[in-house]
Amino acid sequence: MPKKQFDFIVFDWDGTLMDSTATIVQCIQSAARDLGLPVPDQRKASHVIGLSLQSAMEAAIPDVDPGFYPQIIERYRYHYLTQDHGLTLFDGVREMLTDLAGQGYFLAVATGKSRAGLDRALAVSGLKPLFDATRCADETFSKPHPAMLQELTHELGQEMNRTVMIGDTTHDLLLAKNAGAAGIAVHYGAHTPDDLCALQPLFAANSVAELHTWLNQHA
């Protein structure tokens, strides 16, 4: 079947490809607890997933002396690094990406992770060969600034109007909107279906299998 709409498919990582939302929330909460700071609830901690680490901590744990955030980030990284080796891809992710790459789509990742963090995750998961390019929050502006998609399309010679961004947060959908790309939501990650629906994504998937089927039929 010929491609209908897109040549370039960009994925968020945490909560979209990797089942890491609960772990990230726990690590944010543990970092605050370690330092005697107010511990954000599950909704507040999950809402910041997808932002750069600095922006995420400032939003999840506000009203703190700015000079204190490096310590919060250090404690977050300590907790995350003790657990990230146990994180797994959502069921069907490897098969979906392999299929899409085989059909000739350009594939990329746009993530709030650091370069070191994404490289580690790509190596552990074995997915690195499937992606044509990646962009991380410590290399450019954090979501929802359009820079990640602008840089990725420029790097790979793609057109924004034939690019789709897929993610589990409003940050991902706003990134797509701000860049002039299409946006697809997944409902199994960090943000609620209601929050995602308010941004009118092109499609919303309840599972990787549902996303894979839609992409094969409509992308």
Image: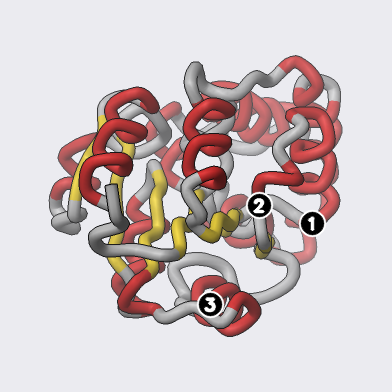
- Residue 182 in picture, x, y percent from top left: 28, 65
Q: Residue at x 48, y 43 (%)?
A: 100
Residue 74 sits in quarter: top right
SS for tag 1?
Answer: helix
Residue 68 sits in quarter: bottom right
Tell me the number on the disc at residue 131: 2
Q: Is 124 left, or right, of 215 in this rendering?
A: right
> Mark 1 and mark 3: span between their CA atoms?
19 Å
- Few, some or many C-alpha atoms within 10 Å of disc 3 (few <14, some 14-19, many ≥20)? many
Q: How is the image coloured?
A: secondary structure
- Residue 121 in picture, x, y percent from top left: 76, 37
Question: Would you name the residue on which mark 3 appears?
Answer: 153
SS for tag 3?
Answer: helix
Amino acid tagged 2:
Phe
Rendered view: 126 above or below 164? above
Question: Would you name the residue on which mark 1 appears?
Answer: 115
